[in-house]
Amino acid sequence: MLWPAPALCEEWLASGPLSDGRLGCVSYRSNGSWVFGTACVDDREQGMRQAAQRAYADVFQVLDREGCPQLQRLWNYMRAINAEEAGLERYRRFNLGRAQAFLDAGRGLEDGAPAACAMGTAQGPLTVHFLAGRHSPLAIENPRQVSAYRYPQRYGPRSPTFSRAALADLGEGVHVLFISGTASIVGHESVHLGDVVRQAGECLDNIDAVLAAALPHVGGPWTLAALRERLECTVYLRHPEDLAAVREVISGRLGVGTPAAEAAVYLQADVCRAELLVEIEAQVRLAPQEAS
Ligand code: 3EB
């Protein structure tokens, strides 16, 4: 059994006994069925591509060692995400290194990719938090969007490796649906350039489309309306001054005062395409006895 704790930080509570481990740049904690950990690499020395490759290579070694090979959810944070490094944007360099590590570990870039976000921070080393388990989550795509791993080359020499959502089985009938960082992208194009209100609306349209795609897999009693009511959203804003406008969009769509609108967390971060002003990720815990 595993369950998310209600906190601003990522905190996961697992039934013990727990063991701590370190390997390369990763520190982690495991209960034998679940591993949560963090890889930290100073990308100033080796550059972003090498840093990403090293972070993910060490993560994959940890997963093999712990017998929990299946990534469920990744949180990627990096400084100056949209800045160029030796002629290529650092986020694109990150994608090169991440994809190489997947291939080196014999992992496919497409099938069963985990849910993920990739955000730009003000400072700090490349930091990758991960949650992995014994069983593969069910990967869910968004019919309104090209799968990220099939993006055309113009977004960078290697595509990102994540699914639009991952449905993880936490045990005892409980599931969690992780919806990846969701942006104002239709097909593979960024839309509503320069308009944060419409970008936020498009993010929510995309989240609704992912929820609708997940619905057949999450067991009869859940409705789209009930799923929306229970979402735990994290909203990343490129510009802090957009907070009030985006909060209004979220409340308008999730309902003023609803649990989802009240629980939404707003953070400043850079989004991984320079033209995107907002990105929204969401998770929802699904326990059958609470269904409606
Ligand atoms: C997008 O849809 C927006 O590189 O892991 C969202 C979530 C995005 C995760 C990643 C990137 C990633 O393409 C960008």
Image (cartoon, rainbow, N blue to C red):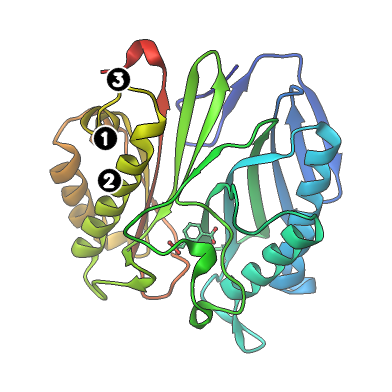
Foreground label between 3 and 1: 3
Q: Residue at x 26, y 75 (%)?
A: 193
Which circle's residue, 3 or 1, is located before the other in the chain?
Answer: 3
Q: Amino acid at mark 1?
A: Arg
* Quadrant position of residue 276: bottom left
Residue 253, placed above or below residue 172: below
Q: Which quarter of the figure has residue 43?
A: bottom right
Label 3 vs label 1: CA separation?
A: 14 Å
Answer yes or no: is residue 121 visible: no
Residue at disc 3, CB closer than 8 Å to ligand 1: no
Q: Earlier in the sequence, mark 2 or mark 1?
A: 2
Tell me: 272 left or right of 91.
left
- Picture coordinates of residue 287, whole percent (x, y): 41, 17
Q: In the rendered picture of this protein, how many numbered marks are placed on residues?
A: 3
**Is the C-beta separation of discs 2 and 1 under 8 Å?**
yes
Residue 228 tag number: 1
Q: Earlier in the sequence, mark 2 or mark 3?
A: 2
Residue at 55% over, 55% down: 162
Residue 221 is marked as 3
SS category of the residue bearing label 3 = loop
As helix, strand or loop, the secondary structure at mark 2 comes to: helix
Q: Nearer the viewer, residue 221 or 286?
A: 221
Residue at left offset 31%, top offset 59%: 144
Mark 2: amino acid: Asp
Residue 152 image offset from top left, x and y in percent = 49, 77
Quadrant location, the C terminus: top left
Give residue 274's quadrant in the image: bottom left
The reply to whether discs 3 and 1 touch (Cβ–Cβ < 8 Å) is no
